[in-house]
Amino acid sequence: MQLLRFPELPHDRLMHIDLEPIEPAVVFLPPEAVALTVATQGASIINNVPQITGGPEGSLTYKTQDERGLRYDVSLANADEPTSVAVGPNERPRYLSLPADLPPKVAELARSWVGHTTDPRLEARLIEARLRKDYRYDVDSTSGAAKNPLVDFLFVSKRGHCEFYSTAMAVMLRTLGVPTRNVTGFIGGTYNRFARSYAVRQGDAHSWVEVYLEDTGWTRFDPTPPANAAPQSDITGLLAFVRDFVEATTQRWNRHVIGYDLKQQVGLLRSVHRSYSELRGRPGTIGKMLSSPRTTMLIAIALLGAAYGVYWYSRRRKALSPASRAATERETAAREIVELYQQLEAALAMRGVARPTGTPPRAHALGLVALGHPVGEEALALTELYIAGRFGGVTLSADERREFTRRVRALRVQKPPGEQVAA
């Protein structure tokens, strides 16, 4: 068990979080968190507790030995208590920095949207409103493949996903002298009627903006159009019913079987110790037997042997179970397909068309096709193979993986149309 405390604030609420393995291994916390109690899933007496590491902006990352994710309880501050941390004069420039190549027209656009006002809160609301009203949500925006994605989004396509919106608002406010920071995480979630909890999935990932205001500290704004900022369930009806039931069952299994943690084990040992002490105190044969050091030692050895046998059997059963083998095969296939796409990304970077951070793979490939880039069509075809293998349940054979690598190598040396090779 591991306890971390943040700035001491009164708290009266508790949130329990079961975090599945995620990359990067970030510990997600609500902004009003004041304390964090951590325990591994299935931690035993001989296992180490998770390693929690602090990062910039108060972020936390974790590392576990079994890579099963993380279980933790978060203590939340009272709703009327301020939780924002003040930004000192020395830190302020960090939240006002801008790219050296940012065109002046971005600042001009920001000033035209806010008019003559100099109130940071009003400036934030005006820019948020214009982005929500005048721009369209599009996960396949061609701006991701542009030389300057932000400028293309603001002045050309006027279409993009949440990261375009949050980046645009953060940068525009900084040109006006308002400190901002871009935030990524999850929004919303789906209530599970069986588990009586909220399930937050990959589809709930989102990006928004925090603006530093002198009276309220870091304040959230979300410039993404409202219809697309909230998560939308990909399935409904009977399928959603079945999904919720399966997720609730899995959660209970993880918590009460796999998650038989150190606290529960210590409680069991204490219970055994109490029962043993009571038996020793009783008159009669049992009490006499337990009073003998030799008998006590033999019983202890037998209990340890039984415990080890149960542990070995459970590990062996898990290792040999069809479900475990299938999970291992899926993990291996996922790792292999990701490595293949990393080869493709390296090849595109060599051709001068690296995928910008935050741009989905397919959107980047479609952007290259739209621009008529000579590697566009092949990049799109290989990206479609990657998506089918990574998310579509398609397993690439050894020959197909070798063919993928061969096509990537050919992509590295592909000559533009009309280019002559020196003799």
Image (tube, rainbow, N blue to C red):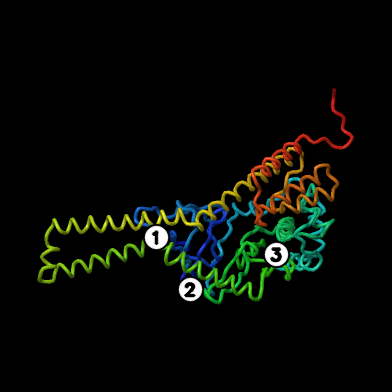
Q: Residue furthest right?
A: 418
Q: Secondary structure at mark 1?
A: loop
Of pointers 2 and 3, the one earlier in the residue sequence = 2
Q: Toward which corner of the image does residue 302 lie, by quadrant?
A: bottom left
Position above or below: 414 against 299: above
Percent x, y of residue 28: 55, 61
Percent x, y of residue 411: 76, 39
Q: Nearer the viewer, mark 1 or mark 2?
A: 1
Using the numbered discs, state the Cα–Cα distance from disc 1 to disc 2 in whole angstroms.
20 Å
Residues packed near mark 3 inside 10 Å, few (<14), some (14 to 19) or many (20 plus): some
Using the numbered discs, state the Cα–Cα distance from disc 2 to disc 3 in whole angstroms.
32 Å
Taking the spot 72% from the left edge, 51% from the top edge, the residue there is: 361
Q: Which residue occupies the foreground of this view, 96 or 297?
A: 297
Which image quarter holds the C terminus?
top right
Count numbered badges in the picture.
Answer: 3
Q: Is residue 417 left or right of residue 101?
A: right
Of pointers 3 and 1, the one earlier in the residue sequence = 1
Residues packed near mark 2 inside 10 Å, few (<14), some (14 to 19) or many (20 plus): few
Q: Which residue occupies the foreground of this view, 49 or 122?
A: 49
Identify the residue under disc 3.
120
* The disc label shown at residue 13, or none: 2
Amino acid type shown at disc 3: Pro
Amino acid type shown at disc 1: Met
Percent x, y of residue 154: 80, 57
Which image quarter holds the N terminus?
bottom left
Identify the residue under disc 1.
1
